Image (tube, rainbow, N blue to C red):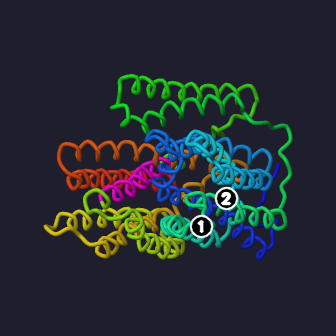
């Protein structure tokens, strides 16, 4: 059995390993935001239809969310290093494919492959942190991880607009994908030299049947959530979602049957019996439900109601992201002393930020970009207090041998929540905007965000009681 724990890696070396894996996380995080800025230019050059443009964003999320558990389990079976290397190399190659795509359909296929390779790479980041930092330095390590999350958001918003505007070497929108290639190669070379190797777990193999069934079930659930607005929430979408839920239920029965036969199921079923872990996943879902959807709604409001240019709207979020970084560094230290209470405090600050934002938007005069940037910093502070230590707190009860599987379940829950939030709150925004105004649509969305944070607090409180 492989166990890459701190005892097997020198104190100095593990910080270099941390630098490598969080660099990969940074590359992934930048890619998640940078593409949105370049979408209008992509649509023009590739003559892509609106459905194709939406698919360029959605298919990446679907592939990543549905395969991240598989990626985490592969890390448990083969060790974090080889799977991490395969993920980084794959992400680099598929980024190059995206940059060279000649049509909307080809770019969609490349984005599908890019999301799949990200699902190999990203779970190894959290698994490596979980295994390397089991001592008093754990809070600091996860604080650095949270800092990277914040910086990747700010870099994605700013770098996307900069590259499209600067148009280096006449690449246009393709530059946002080409930029991953040199960084991916450097990360690969560093990982080959510095990351410690872990022995393969003998007698284990990937649960292929489980992976296929889970992929099908989550596609049936996530697909309609993402594309429902375009087809006016037709009845067949609801039937597909119901079928997806049934398939996921069948997946759990399949996993129990595999375990009963002495096999190795895709998901470590012991995780489902961990009450604290399951409460933590509930908190993760509702926290991320109000994550990407918040940025979507705010971007729509700033461009449609306030008439801001896409680049200006993106720059409004940069102070928020930098505040997120500062809060992340602070939360790592506090989480060691106060545990889940820090997460609750962060959720409360987010609710306060939402209330201040609503009051600002409700004023008779349209808020300026600097004023919005200042107000959004409150929300960013709350997000940083929660997101940085959240993964560490939720995964704290997971055994080292199941770190990859636990990280995969965590990642799937977060991405499914992101997709659900974008679909549900996005649909709410569009529906109210159509019959009233973008301002009223924003108010309704902010109320939904606040409700999501309240539910997140309830799950965190349950998790805290379960850990006692």
Q: Which residues are magenta?
A: 280-301
Q: Are marks 1 and 2 in contact (CB under 8 Å)?
A: yes
Q: Residue 165's x, y, as percent?
A: 50, 67
Label 2 sits on residue? 125
Q: Is residue 212 above or below residue 402?
A: above
**Secondary structure state at the residue bearing disc 1:** helix
Magenta-highlighted stretch: main secondary structure?
Answer: helix
Q: Is residue 392 visible?
A: no
Measuring 28% from the left and 75% from the top, which residue is drawn there? 371
Q: Left or right: 84 with respect to 420?
A: right
Q: Nearer the viewer, residue 11 or 72?
A: 72
Q: Left or right: 249 with respect to 350?
A: right
Label 1 sits on residue? 145
Q: Quadrant of residue 64?
A: top right
Q: Is residue 89 above or below residue 155?
A: above
Q: Left or right: 177 with respect to 389?
A: right
Residue 240 tag number: none
Measuring 25% from the left and 68% from the top, which residue is drawn there? 356
Q: Residue 292's x, y, as percent?
A: 43, 54
Q: Nearer the viewer, residue 276 or 353?
A: 353
User: Does the magenta-highlighted stretch encompass residue 291?
Assistant: yes
Q: Residues within 10 Å of mark 2 (few under 14, many from 20)?
A: many
Q: Nearer the viewer, residue 307 or 325?
A: 307
Residue that extends furthest to the left in the rendered view of this protein: 364
């Amino acid at each position: 059995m492989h166990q890459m724990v701190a005892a097997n890696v020198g104190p100095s070396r593990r910080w270099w390993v941390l630098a490598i894996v969080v660099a990969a996380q940074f590359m992934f995080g930048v890619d998640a935001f940078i593409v949105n800025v370049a979408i209008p230019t992509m649509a023009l050059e590739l003559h892509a239809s609106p459905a194709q443009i939406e698919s360029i964003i959605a298919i990446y999320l679907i592939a990543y969310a549905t395969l991240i558990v598989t990626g985490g389990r592969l890390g448990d079976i083969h060790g974090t290093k080889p799977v991490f290397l395969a993920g980084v190399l794959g992400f680099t190659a598929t980024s190059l494919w995206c940059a060279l795509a000649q049509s909307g359909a080809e770019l969609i296929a490349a984005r599908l492959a890019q999301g799949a390779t990200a699902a190999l790479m990203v779970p190894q980041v959290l698994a490596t942190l979980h295994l390397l930092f089991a001592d008093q330095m754990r809070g600091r390590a996860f604080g650095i991880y949270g800092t990277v999350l914040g910086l990747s958001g700010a870099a994605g918003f700013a770098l996307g607009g900069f590259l499209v505007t600067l148009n280096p070497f006449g690449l246009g929108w393709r530059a946002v994908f080409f930029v991953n290639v040199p960084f991916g190669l450097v990360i690969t070379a560093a990982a080959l030299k510095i990351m410690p190797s872990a022995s393969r777990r003998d007698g284990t193999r990937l649960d292929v049947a489980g992976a296929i069934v889970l992929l099908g079930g989550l596609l049936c659930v996530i697909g309609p959530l993402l594309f429902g607005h375009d087809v006016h929430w037709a009845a067949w979408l609801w039937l597909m979602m119901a079928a997806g839920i049934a398939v996921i239920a069948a997946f759990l029965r399949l996993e129990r049957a595999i375990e009963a036969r002495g096999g190795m199921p895709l998901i470590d079923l012991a995780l489902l019996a961990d009450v604290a872990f399951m409460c933590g996943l509930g908190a993760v879902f509702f926290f991320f439900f109000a994550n990407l959807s918040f940025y979507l709604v705010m971007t729509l409001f700033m461009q449609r109601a306030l008439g801001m240019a896409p680049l200006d709207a993106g720059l409004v979020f940069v102070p928020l992201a930098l505040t997120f970084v500062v809060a992340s560094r602070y939360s790592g230290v506090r989480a060691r002393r106060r545990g889940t209470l820090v997460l609750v405090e962060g959720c409360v600050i987010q609710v306060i930020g939402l209330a201040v934002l609503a009051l600002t938007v409700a004023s008779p005069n349209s808020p300026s970009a600097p004023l919005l940037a200042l107000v959004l910093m409150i929300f960013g502070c709350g997000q940083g207090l929660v997101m940085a230590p959240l993964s560490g707190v939720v995964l704290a009860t997971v055994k080292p041998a199941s770190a990859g599987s636990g990280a995969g379940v965590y990642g799937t829950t977060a991405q499914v929540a992101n997709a659900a939030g974008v679909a549900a709150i996005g649909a709410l925004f569009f529906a109210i905007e159509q019959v009233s105004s973008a301002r009223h649509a924003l108010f309704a969305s902010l109320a939904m965000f606040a409700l999501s944070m309240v539910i997140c607090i309830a799950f965190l409180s349950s998790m805290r009681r379960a850990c006692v």
